[in-house]
Amino acid sequence: MKVFIAGIDGYLGWSLARHLAGRGADISGADRFLRRAWVEEMGSGSVVPIAPMPERLDAFRSRFGRDLRFFEGDLCDYRFVRDALADVRPDAVVHLGEMPSAPYSMIDVDHCVFTHQNNVIGTLNVLYAMREACPDAHLLKLGTMGEYGTPNLDIPEGFFTVDYRGRTDTLPFPRQAGSWYHWTKVHDSNNVMFACRLWGLAATDIMQGVVFGTGLDPTEARLNTRFDIDQAFGTTINRFCAQAVIGHALTPYGSGHQRRGFLPLADSMACLTLALDHPPGEGEYRVLNQFQEVYSVTELAEKVRAVGNRKGLDVTIQPLENPRVEREDHHYNPDHQGLRDLGYEPTTDVETELGRVLDDLTDHRGEILKRQSVFVPDIRWNAARRPVSAQPVADDAMDKSR
Amino acid sequence: MKVFIAGIDGYLGWSLARHLAGRGADISGADRFLRRAWVEEMGSGSVVPIAPMPERLDAFRSRFGRDLRFFEGDLCDYRFVRDALADVRPDAVVHLGEMPSAPYSMIDVDHCVFTHQNNVIGTLNVLYAMREACPDAHLLKLGTMGEYGTPNLDIPEGFFTVDYRGRTDTLPFPRQAGSWYHWTKVHDSNNVMFACRLWGLAATDIMQGVVFGTGLDPTEARLNTRFDIDQAFGTTINRFCAQAVIGHALTPYGSGHQRRGFLPLADSMACLTLALDHPPGEGEYRVLNQFQEVYSVTELAEKVRAVGNRKGLDVTIQPLENPRVEREDHHYNPDHQGLRDLGYEPTTDVETELGRVLDDLTDHRGEILKRQSVFVPDIRWNAARRPVSAQPVADDAMDKSR
């Protein structure tokens, strides 16, 4: 299978390139290295050192015995995307080439506008380029569980059948995103759905939960994927694990009652592979919710503390004022049956995976220590930028978080 | 009341400036004259001649005894929008500054991307500029009934309360737009809804039906608003009326069974004024469906024929192949109670209004004759550009259209 990965230099993109190559796929991809620049703009960098692309490509060739075809360029440049796809003629296009951070999109009007430009225009170009260059290829696009928000209903996979005033229809489940970034993903989902209806494109839209984990190669450091810990590009569990290994308090925001779906990086790779192995039919727009388990932020902090303590780390928890505008106490029961029906079985339990992350990060304590100032967020949802303050743990936090 | 109109040079924008000024409002506005350029790009032009902006402003001053403050510039330039709003400090911002044509957005990838850029980024800039310059002003944004598409359910005004698996919530009604243009309006509606939640902005989102009518000033031609008849910027009824006055067959697309909400230009002005006179509360995102009556395209063609015949015009109907991808036979029962609750009463019946349009256009037959080649559409939803062919009228067209 020929797979083209847009955003191949990123956390998921590079991991997927290795994972699929290991299964024999022919990999190509594009990137403009914006993720490296954004994290630098946040005053941080990957705490697992990552190689420049030429070195990644060398190491890839040595490991897999064949080349990865790399195209350097911008998805916002239509001709670039079309020419790359026309050249490769892939069986599947995995679209991971978006700006993936809610806080980054909330900094100010320029970052909000940039996020819309980059994500929405990039996705439109991918759609038109596929129509022109490889209309029969399968588009596997990364969405996010954050598109749904936190309605007071169970969350189906993309669509639900609803009765209203005596009539029935199956409709897109209403989206209520909580950041400009998440809204751009909603806009993209809507545009992909429309392209399927319009041109018969076959697409899978993955509503992904929060991914955590280190993507270290056991023997070749140049094949490692990045690991971020800053407020914008470090996800919750990755931040907690980095905090734990240097003795920094874990810093959940607000009450910590917010519930989300999480999954290990290895499971994310397994799920994307399953979707690629089982493409939808012509004109089908398939939505799959992708996460292993739902936890509250407090539960996760407690898990990291427990696993850390077993490893002899002294882990404490210090909640911070929540810089976001979000519901902290809410119903959360999303479906995630589609990928199980395709054969997904969780590869590991969360505790085992957390232990592995803590072990992997131990070698990188120096890099984390250097960057620990990035643990205090200052990007607020009200567009004022000011560091948050510590706040006491609510007595009932543990009870309410269930 | 100080009202700032974004897109003040357009069909609705110029009409609204005159209408509100006549009621004593202090009017300012912005435009970059893109509508004039887009219609030219379609090989057409307003068949009611319109004056350049300096002449419009002269005539406005003579008629209303005061200046209209005009800002020439692009909503995609944040600093321009913010500076204009900071200068004016309006009580209300009416956002009509979007590319309003479905076919135009469907021409090719460049037009699709332009429509997203122009509409989505322009609206984000209006939101941020209001937050910075006039956070207490009322945003009156023009959406479209086309955002809802044609679900097999009644269409509420923006939100509906739904039971699902034993739980209940009030959610945004799912949108299923039928063109890239309509999707940009969905994206904008979502972004405006989010800004209200985020910053406490007060906004009214008007889901407007198809507007028709001539906005002629009885004594001063320089105050007339534009009237378009091309496939992209001429709306259905305006095209039918222009066809009728030159003896060109009316050209509904496909079966003509497609049902939509319509309203006369005068009623659109009355409704926008009512919304301005009754702003929503802080943080409220209010959706109002705005149309007078639902008709099928065939019914409208028949109405134009009947009214034209009474005026001695020989009106025939020649259906054309439908260049769009759309459901032609569908349920359509949208609510439109909100504006009635604010006091809206239809100013006229559709037949009377059609008669007026036919009379008004009689003076402009020469301009229509010059441009009649634009009546045959060639922009297809499948991204191939090729003129459509004539097709026979289905025998049952009249029955099924009810």
Image (cartoon, coloured by chain):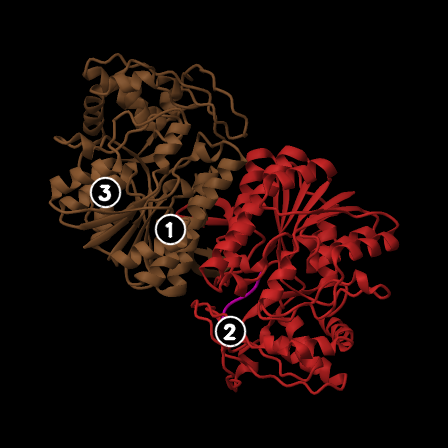
Chain colours: A red, B brown
Above-or-below relation of A152 to B361: below
Tell me the number on the disc at residue A378.
2
- Give residue A400's position: percent from left, percent from top: 53, 78
Q: Which residues are magenta?
A: A328-334
Q: Chain under label 2?
A: A
Above-or-below relation of B292 to A371: above
Mark 2 and mark 3, same subunit? no
Q: Nearer the viewer, residue A184 or A148?
A: A184
- In this view, the mark in front (2 or 1): 2
Quarter of the figure that contains the C terminus of chain A: bottom right
Magenta stretch: includes residue A27: no
- In this view, the mark in front (2 or 3): 2
Upstream in sequence: badge 1 or badge 3: 3
Q: Chain under label 3?
A: B
Q: Chain under label 1?
A: B
Residue that mark 1 sits on: B158
Q: CA distance from mark 2 to mark 3?
A: 43 Å
